[in-house]
Amino acid sequence: MAIVNRLTVDGRDYFLPDPVSELKTKILEAIKAGGGYVNIPPLRGGPGVDILFSPGMPVTWSQFEVGDTPAPSDEQSEDLADYGL
């Protein structure tokens, strides 16, 4: 199972891999300084997104586990085979 973190900023969701403690610190520092840009890294690859954080801006964190899903099978399930589907 992988842990995915969701950062919601002003109604927009950003999904981040673990760890996020350094990112949380940067966001908190930007807010304490009266505002500042923080780069939000992408979940997989790329440059990320620079977001201007300021006091009073709604920011929430949530964390959840994502299970590995099995690859789809080309074989018919036994239930469907019984009905000729």
Image: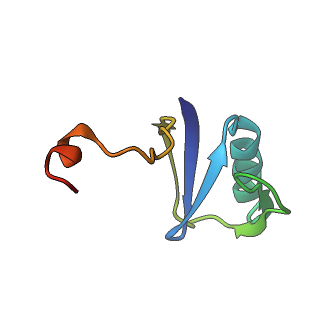
Residue in view at x 51 percent, y 35 percent = 68
Residue in view at x 76 percent, y 57 percent = 30
Color theme of the render: rainbow
Q: How many marks?
A: 0
Q: Outermost residue toward the left? A: 83
76 w.r.t. 48: above or below: above
Residue 46 in percent (x, y) is at 83, 61
36 w.r.t. 3: above or below: below
Q: Is residue 13 left or right of residue 43?
A: left
Q: Outermost residue toward the front? A: 84
Q: Nearer the viewer, residue 60 or 73?
A: 73
Q: Name which quarter of the figure residue 85 lies in.
A: bottom left
Residue in view at x 73 percent, y 42 percent = 25
Q: Nearer the viewer, residue 35 or 14?
A: 14
Q: Is residue 59 left or right of residue 73?
A: right
Residue in view at x 48 percent, y 35 percent = 67
Residue 71 in percent (x, y) is at 51, 42
Residue 26 in percent (x, y) is at 77, 48
Q: Nearer the viewer, residue 15 or 1?
A: 1
Q: Name which quarter of the figure residue 21 lies in.
A: top right
Residue 29 in percent (x, y) is at 76, 50
